[in-house]
Each structure stands twice: as structure tokens, then as C-alpha cells.
Amino acid sequence: MAVHRSGPLKQQNKAHKGGRHRGRGSAQRDGKGRVAVKVLSKKARKELSRVDQRHRASQLRKQKKEAVLAEKRQLGSKDGPPHQVLLVPLHGRVSLGEALQLLQDTDKKVVPVGEQAGMPSFMLLCPQLKHRWFFTSAMPGDLHTVLDLAKVADTILFILDPVEGWDSTGDYCLSCLFAHGLPTYSLAIQGVGGLLPKKQADAKKKLSKALEKRFPGDRLLHLDTPQDAVVLLRQLANQKQRHLAFRDRRSYLFAHAADFVPSQESSLVGTLKVSGYVRGQTFNVNRLLHIVGHGDFQIRQIDAPTDPFPLNPRVIKASRDSDVAMQIDTAEADGAAEMEEDLKVLVKADPARQESLQSEVVPDPMEGEQTWPTEEELNEAKDFSKEETKVVKKVPRGTSSYQAEWIVDEEDGSSGEEKEEEDDDDAEAEDFMEEENSEAEGSEEECETMTLGESVRDDQYDEKIDEEAEEQMLEKYKQERLDEMFPDEVDTPRDIAARIRFQKYRGLKSFRTSPWDPKENLPQDYARIFQFEDFSRTRKRIFKEIGEKESEGAEVGWFVTLHVCGVPASVGESFRQGAPLVMFSLLPHEQKMSVLNMVVRRHPGNLEPVKSKEEMIFHCGFRRFRASPLYSQHTAADKHKAERFLRSDVALVVTVYAPITFPPASVLLFKQKPDGKHSLIATGSLLSMDPDRMVIKRLVLSGHPFKILTKMAVVRYMFFNREDVLWFKPVELRTKWGRRGHIKEPLGKRGWSLEVTVFPAAEHVTGQFCCRFWGSFNIGCDISGAIGKVARLTAHAAGCLPLEPPPACSGLEGPERPSALPSPHPPPLFLQRRKLRQR
């Protein structure tokens, strides 16, 4: 009798587990020490009970609260730096002298320090409040001084007019400060008591309504009497501090005194002894020092003199029985400090650990030198070219490979691809028509008629106008308007062949997907800058070391004297004339030159056309320098289209040569006018430090359709000789409505007309045919002028030669150190591949 046997597809049921549920111990015995992958890759998290979770949350809240209170108590105390307050009047009717006098008449000890930016500065000591303030002031018209003092100020005190609040100059100053980064601020009104009692309430209502836009929810204080000044001081002392990211991770110092000692070799360069309070982080003597507006320098040593502004001066009893006490005079304390200054050397720089001032690399012209390729490399290049050019075709039997090369496969372009392209082109054309109609309707709705009154002094309007400057500005407006209407279009030259004039550009099948080597045909100056292998990883590592690692040097709140060597005599002269001296300690690698990219947007109050490569003044974080930038689109692709003008409707990326700066950092762009004044052009933030960011320039040649047939069109005035038509024959043409085509052949002897094969059908071809070329838009400058100075950089365009071998960039020195980009030279194998492709 045959026995039935189940097949391989028989259902397998789970076996029944008898007995009680298996516990954790039996599971571990069965596993025999094996641990799951998730447990190995992640840290073991201890599950807390609900009571423990609440207790932990309360502890975290308590720690944060204690940290905020400790920071508030340290600022202005005897162990911390003085509370630095910057007074900025926002209206012309505000009297700054009266405000300073009211603050000095508050029964507190006042110690005059000197003049900063032409205005008196003083130290205010208050033992009752256990607080000390350092007051400086600046006028809103002196914009760079206001921004330099705002970099180090703990609090900015804005003084408003009771009727109007601020004028146009004050509003412009506020725009710059908000874009730069605003520390803690307070608002004070001056002159309310001078108004009639009936008008005071109305003035306060109007001012509060105006403040809702700029300062929503902020408290207004009065500054008319000494009692108001006392209330204001208490508000400043108890106010919560706001942080600026670019100065929290660096140590910085505001100079209270400076003495220039010329060197023995030259009187133009010497040692600058700067005294002030350490702020931010611990001051490391081996780090470089950046003086805002003057450059980077090395520190020789740090001295620790006696604090000239102690909150509680030393007390000497006259006798044991009497209760009379005598305070040491300030002048005697200063004299004692000068006597002990040479004895109290805090720390000296270590030459082995001190950072170098090298900001650029001297390129070696023989670094990338190469020999003629060997036979093995030539054969490898030939095999590679054969692999790339393999095409499968249907040929008759017995056909050799040489004969198969001459057989044209007419069915390569399938109808399915053409249909998809036709659908895409129709969709693009419909979208374009809808956008034009919407723009036309919007322009009709926005138009209105206005009646303007005649000016009384029309004949004197243009008395002081510079005609030459006006002609240049008119030409800029015309160029900007043409670039908006016909972006990137240029006229085909007739005095020189187009294939020679545009030999630095190439045609691309697709700007998004076509390959482009970022190291190809770099300018010679790229061998002199530095590049990180992984900039974000280096930035994270440096910031982590600042938060965790304890550095040696002058602690925060100490009054120190820095011996800065190699300083020009002009720095000490500018300080004696009243200019503020602000210094920041640099992080590792921040003195080296590289390519910075910044995202900016046009300021709405400035409509002047700004062309690419015009010199601008940059405020980038704690730095101030001059540069001639390039503008490009802000996209997520690997290639970015260059812009000829700084557009006002979108955010653009600004690319410049500048010293390395770790983000986050705010960016302000100013342009200097012929009269010496500076106007704010754009504001933004620092994006990245990336020399490999490709900025591609586009050129468009246009031609007029002369005859339109079913699948062909005759185009005129795109080229003016037959050789140019044949040279640019592989480049695809496009119309502004999305139709595409290829050049078939030139017509006539002179080549003014050419025949174009159009797909889809040319029934609806209207407008012009455009031939688009692309070339790399690299920046170049004389970097030597930026060593130890304010970077005055000049950018220029450098295109990409399609027939020349691309340069190579060899490996970098390490993931954590920036290395120099070597001199551009091609590898032998890649050179041979390019030559074989050209053949």
C-alpha cells in the first residue's frame, strides 16, 4: 500500500509552547551571550519612572536658571568685565551730551576714560548695586564706528525723540544694526517733560504704535531727570543678555588704553601695548589677534596690571582706635600699577605652539610637472575610448566593423521620446503664456494717475550734479534693464570669428545633468589658497574643543595688557585720533585665505544697479574688508548660473576671496559713493567656505527665423560666416517657447543663414532661435595685498577652454587641516583620453 508523503509546499505550523511563559533569564541562557545589533550600536538607555523624569526635568531647569543668573551676576561685578553700554541717538533733536550728563549725576563714582569716536567715554562705579558700567557713544551717521562698537557692546541704549521717535538717519542705522546682529538693547525717551501735558499722552500713543514694528513688546524708559537715570541703570543691570554667535566662541577685547613702541629697524612698524578687559572666552597668547579694520597680528606676551577701575577700592585704616578710613587715590594706584607692570607677566608666547601669520601658499610651478605617457597608459586610454563608443546596430550578415561604422540607424530617435519632449515643451509654453498674462493684468491693476506739484526751485535742481557720473549711472540702468529683458544675450561679433571669440565656452545638453569637473582650468591664484577636505567636520571639532577643553591664558574679566608685535604705526595714530580699537582672537585656520560664499538679499531702500565685480565693503562677522564679488543663483544643484547684476527679487550667493571664517556670521555689503559716503546694498549671512563651488556663466546668441517649414526653419543673423556655422553645429538650439532643433547646414556662401531641423514640428515657431554656451566663471585676485592687511580683492572672470586639458587637484593633507590647492596640471591618462575623443 502506497504511503502519502507531503510535498515541499506543505504548510508548517508553529509548535505549541507548553508550560509557563519564558522569562528573561531563560532567554539569556538560550542566547548564550549573543547581543542584538541594535544594542551594540546604541547606548543602553535606562528607563526612568515618572517621578524620576519630573525630578530630572526640574534639575535641568534649575541648572539653566543658575547659569543665566551666574552670567548676569558676573557682568559688571568685581570679578567680571564692566558692563559696556553704547548710546546711540536716533534723532537729530536728541541731545547726547545731556543724556551723558544725567548718567554722570546719579551720585555714583565717575571715572573719565577718554574719547571714543570723538565722544567722551567714562566708567561709572556703583558699590551699592555691586555693578560698574562703561559708557561709550556714537552718532548714527558714523556707521562703521557704530557697527564696530556694536561688535563688543553688552547693551545698546537707543535714545528716541518723543514726537517722531527716529529720523531717516536713525532708521537707516537701525536697519544696519538689525542685519548685523543686535545685542541686548534698551529704549529711552528724552524730552517728554518739555511737551505740554495734553500732548504727552498723544505723543506716547503715536510713539508706541511706531515702536510695534521695530521693537514689539519692549518697555520705554524716560531720561529727563537724575531719578530717571537711576531707574535706567537698574534696568540695564537686571536685563537678560542676548548672545551673538560670532563672539561667544571667541575672546575679544575693547581697548581702554594703547601705547605704540616703534621697533629698532623701522619707526613705521612696532609693538602695540593694548590694555582692556578680556571678554567672551579665555585669551590664548598663542592664537592670532585680529584688529578690526587693520589685519591679523601675533601676540608676544600678556601682562596682568592692576585693575584701574576697581569696584571696591582698597581701604587703609588711619589708626587702630579711630574709625576714619582713607581710600587710595586713583593716580597713586595707577602709578603703583605702572611700577609693577614689568613684574606681572602673565604668560609669554611659545614659538613652537604659536600660530603662523601665513595666509597664502607660495605655489611651486614644478609641483604638478609630468612626463610623457608610457605605452601602457596609451593602450589603456585607447581601450577606454573603445568601450565608451560601443553602439549596438542591426547590420546585414558579413558586414565588418569598419563598414558598420558608416551605416546610419534611422530608428535611433524613437517616436516615444519625441512625444514626451513635445508634451514637455507644450507644458512649458502654456506656463510661459499664463505668466505673461498674469504679469500684464497685474501691471494694469497697479497703474494709477497722480497730480504732482511744481517745484519752486526747478532751475537749481541740477546745479551740483556730476554729469559724467550721471551718464555712467544711466548706462548701468540701461544694461540692467537689457539683462532683465534679454538675460545673458550678446551680439555676435562681426569683426572677429565667433568660434574664436567664444572659444572659452561650450554647449551643454542639460545644465543640470551634464558633467563638469570643478578642478578644470582653475586660475593660477587657486594654487595660493587653502581648502578643507571636510569643512563642516573641522568646524564641529573646533567648536566642540571650545566648549569642553580648558585653555590656558587670561580669564574672562581680567584687566590685561597685550603686547602685539608687527603693528603699523597708523593703528596707534588712529586710536589717538579717537577711533575705537576692537580686537578678536582668531580660531585655528582663520588667518588663511580661501573662497567664501555668502547668501545675501538686496536692501529694499537701495535700488541702484550693482554690477558684478564692483568693489564692495564687507562686514562679515567680526571682520571688515573690501572685495570685488561675483553673484550667482542660490540653488541646490552642483552648478550655479552666474548673474551679471545683483538682483532685487531673489536671494543670491556672493563669492569672494577672503580669510576663512567659521559660520554663523552676519554679512553686510556697502558701496562707497563718489562723495565718500557708504550706502547699504545687501544683507545676509555666511553660507560656506567652498572653493569647489562652480559658478557658470551663460551666453546666448539669437537668430531671426526667416522661413518656417513643416520640420525645418531658416534662421538668419545668428552667425556671419560658414566656418562658424559648421563649428557650432553640434550645439542644440532653442526658442523662447521651448522648441528645440539642430543646425543642419549653412545656406549661401557667406553663411548669414542656416537651416535648422526643428522638433516637434515647426508650425508654431515664433520669436528667435537661441544658441546657448556655458563657461566657468572663476574669481581671481592679487592675494599678496591681503597678507596682514584688510583684504582688498579684485575679481575677474576666467572662462573654460574646451580643447585644453583640465587641471587636476591632488589629495589634501588631512581631514582636519586646510591644504593648498596645487598648481593646475593634468594627469597623463586623462590628457590622452581627451585627445583621443577629439580625434
Image (spheres, rainbow, N blue to C red):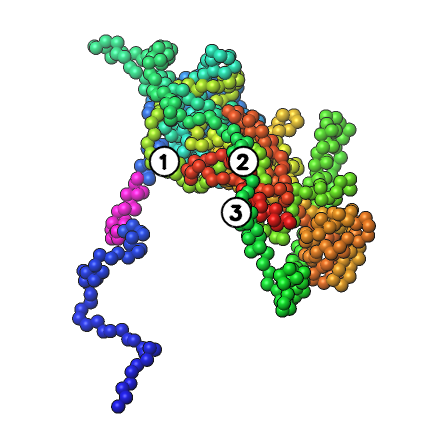
Q: Which residues are magenta?
A: 45-63
Q: Mark 1 — residue?
A: 545
Q: Residue sitting at 37 percent across and 17 percent down?
A: 308
Give the left or right position of residue 804, taking residue 568 as reference.
Answer: right
Q: Nearer the viewer, residue 39 or 600?
A: 39
Mark closest to the chain's N terminus, 1 or 3: 3
- Tag nearer the camera, 2 or 3: 3
Q: CA distance from mark 2 to mark 3?
A: 19 Å
- Where is residue 183 shown, x and y percent of the image? 45, 33
Q: Mark 3 — residue?
A: 376
Q: Nearer the viewer, residue 536 or 232?
A: 536
SS state under label 3: helix
Query: For the residue marked with disc 3, what is the amino acid?
Result: Glu
Q: Nearer the viewer, residue 605 or 347?
A: 347
- Where is residue 746 shown, x and y percent of the image? 77, 53
The answer to whether residue 648 shows anywhere in this view is no
> Any mark on residue 369, and which?
2
Mark closest to the chain's N terminus, 1 or 2: 2
> Any mark on residue 554, and which?
none
Mark closest to the chain's N terminus, 2 or 3: 2
Evaluate if marks 1 and 3 touch, with contact meaning CB atoms under 8 Å apart.
no
Q: Residue sitting at 80 percent across and 53 percent down?
A: 747
Q: Residue sitting at 62 percent across and 42 percent down?
A: 804
Q: Residue sitting at 31 percent across and 77 percent down?
A: 11
* Residue 551 picture quarter: top left
650 in the magenta segment: no
* Residue 274 picture quarter: top left
Query: For the residue marked with disc 2, what is the amino acid?
Result: Glu
SS state under label 1: helix
- Where is residue 106 shown, x and y percent of the image? 41, 21
Task: Characterize the magenta stretch by its predominant secondary structure.
Answer: helix
Q: CA distance from mark 1 to mark 3?
A: 50 Å
